[in-house]
Image (spheres, rainbow, N blue to C red):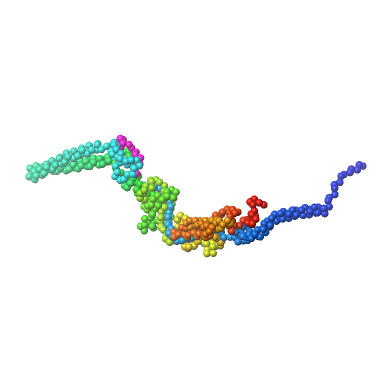
Amino acid sequence: MVNSTQPQSPPPAPPRRRWVGRLLALLVLVLLLAAGWHWWLEPRLALRAQTSASGTQPVAARTAAGGRGRFQTAAAQPVGAATVAKGDIDITLNALGAVTPLATVTVQTQINGYLVAVGFQEGQIIEKGAFLAQIDPRPYEVALEQAQASLQRDQALLQGAKVDLARYQKLAKQNSIAQQQADDQLFLVKQYEGTVRLDQAAIDSAKLNLIYCHIVSPVPGKAKAGLRLIDVGNFVQTSSPTGIVVLTQLQPITVVFPVAEDFLPQIQKRIATGVKLPVTAYDRSSTIKLAEGTLFAVDSQIDPTTGTIKLKAEFDNDDLALFPQQFVNAQLLIDTLKDVVIAPTAAIQRGAPGTFVFKIEANNKVAVTKVRLGPVQGERVAVLSGLSAGDRVVVDGADRLRDGSEVTIPQAKATPGANGRGRRRAAAGGTGQARAGADAGGAATPTAAGAEGSNAGYNKPLKDKKAPASDDKGPGYNPPPDTLTAPPTQPTKRGGP
């Protein structure tokens, strides 16, 4: 029998040695953490003690006092405010309209003939009755002479027939001739009378043709001549579709614009009182006022496809600011609300409570106040309930507020610097900017809103500014903890440890 010898594995380490190794590793880790914490905290504690010895206010105290510490607690929020006032506000309707002339006439000839003269310039402003064109009148002058000659001949025949009729009637009474002969002469006189009247009509027709040879403007008021459609020397005919020129009336002129059918009862009610509703025309961007007029007519039907009805306003257009087929923005003034509470539209907030504003109370805290709004005019809105004249509302910075938040309205203040120089800050508000110097040390108070409910009392919050330089810090300057500087007696160089 052969005995094979197998290698044996080393015996496992005792459990006690494993536990001691882990304990030593944990102890080393704790020592390293303690050394790191001591290395990080020691210079800061020394710097804080040095700062306290120099009399500088600690960071925690400044933070609790509402300074600009890194971990600043809840403090008063700077906001812009406006004062609510009473005034008048207009109820208006705005719509896109088109300038439409009262008359657009294509001047055509009423007789046939050669065009011998043109009496207008292209683009000229023409009044009613002004000379436009001349047709060759000679054929119609000849026709007039012929009609006059025929009239003279027939008038002579009529006179002779009347003399014979008188003679025949006298002889018929004496029974010298037959009564039939006298009656025939009477009918001959009547026939000549009709011929004379026919000749007179021919004369009038010839005179009328001569009038038609001289073409004048038929458009009332002032019209603008377009481009000439035919030149001198052409033979014009009554059947020609082009005509001679197109005249467009400019004074007066109208603007047609649609409004929603919902406003029709209110408009009809105002028209029934006999009031002429004012209409103002603006350019396409609604920045330049072109003309002022009045409502002229209301269409007879509502367009069922759009739910609108067309209105027409008339303008004198003395300065020719309105041009045919021009697109304008028409503003119809329906009514004016007198002596109502007016607030800036920037103060209106919408959320879970509905429509509300942040009203600034006497203790400089805001309260969520529900309001009911009326018509809007530009940046002003009528407040039907919820506010009174003299109330202050937040118009800027409302996104950082809630009910009961404390606010502050920035005002211009003078803060002396370390070198005796004043650092000026201007607070925007009222109608201008208030500035105070280092020697004045005062504050400028913005004016309140005017009687028309304008934003004269609006105070914008101061925007964030960069920290002042290290050589010009005001008493309110609070550096963050990791950038504390040494006391003035031991200045620290820029970029030091």
Q: Main secondary structure of the magenta part?
A: loop
On whether residue 231 falls in the magenta region, the answer is yes
Percent of width and height locating residue 478: 61, 57
Give, as a single range, the part of the protein colored magenta.
224-238
Residue at the farthest right position: 1
> At 50% across and 60% down in the image, what residue appears?
445
Please say if 406 is above or below 497: below
From the viewer's perspective, is 174 left or right of 490? left
> At 55% across and 54% down in the image, what residue appears?
463
Which quarter of the figure has residue 408?
bottom right
Answer whether residue 80 is visible to the viewer in this image: no
From the viewer's perspective, is 452 left or right of 67? left
Percent of width and height locating residue 496: 66, 51
> At 20% across and 37% down in the image, what residue appears?
146
Residue at the farthest bottom position: 362
Q: Return the residue nearer the eye: 411 or 118.
A: 411
